[in-house]
Structures are given as C-alpha cells and as structure tokens.
Image (cartoon, rainbow, N blue to C red):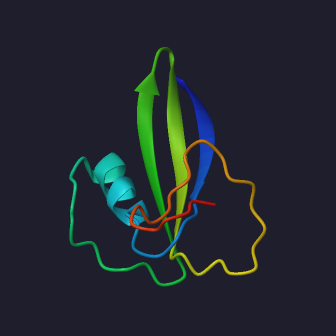
Amino acid sequence: KMAIRELKVCLLGDTGVGKSSIVCRFVQDHFDHNVSPTIGASFLTKTVPCGHELHKFLIWDTGGQERGCHVKIGPNSFWEIRKTRSP
C-alpha cells in the first residue's frame, strides 16, 4: 500500500482572476473559460501518484471576498492582470 501525503492548498485572490479555472484544469484536466463565480468557497480534492507515494491535494477555492483578511502573498498569488498595481 502506498503512503498518502496530504497537501493543503488555499487559493486567494481578487474575484474573476481565474482561480476556479486553474482548479478546474488541475482537478478535472479541463480548462473552462466560463466557470461560474465561486460564492464563499468550494472544496475539491485530487490524488496524484508521485514516486512511491500518493499526493492528495486538499484544495479550497475562495470566491475573492476576503476583504480584511491579512494574508501573506506567496509565489502563486492571483490578481487581476488589468489592474495597474499588484498587491
């Protein structure tokens, strides 16, 4: 039996920047340009074999309404590309 490693991912970013489309591409192997806006948050999982173990991704896809939430911006942050300033 293969070991399972759980990896927790939370996508934060402005509304309408493509967070749900990226999740859809990863989880369902399909890119949808017309994903309905996320209300609140959605939760998805995907298990991927990696070497001698399985990586189980636990993914929270937020709707972009995180106003007042203080979050450190990391390397995989999303924001509206048409804005003149990024966070």
Residue at the front extreme, as displayed: 84
81 is higher (above) or lower (below) than 34 = above
From what the image shows, is residue 31 above or below residue 51?
A: below
Q: Residue at x 29, y 51 (%)?
A: 25
Can residue 1 be seen here? The reply is: no
Where, quadrant-wise, is the C terminus in this rendering? bottom right
Near-viewer residue (67 or 86): 86
Residue located at (52% from left, 41% from top): 56
Q: Residue 24 at what x, y percent from top left?
A: 32, 57
Viewer-closest of 33 and 4: 33
Q: Where is residue 35 in the image (x, y as percent from the top left)?
A: 27, 72
**Based on the displayed image, in which of its 4 quarters is residue 18 positioned?**
bottom left
Q: State whether residue 3 appears in this view.
A: yes
Residue 72 at what x, y percent from top left? Answer: 75, 54
- The residue sitting at 49% across, 65% down in the picture is 84
What x and y, as percent, mark residue 31? 22, 55
What residue is shown at x 35% (from left), y 47% (from top)?
Answer: 26
In the image, 3 versus 67, the foreground residue is 67
From the viewer's perspective, tell me whether residue 22 is left or right of residue 6: left
Side of 32 where 53 appears, left or right? right
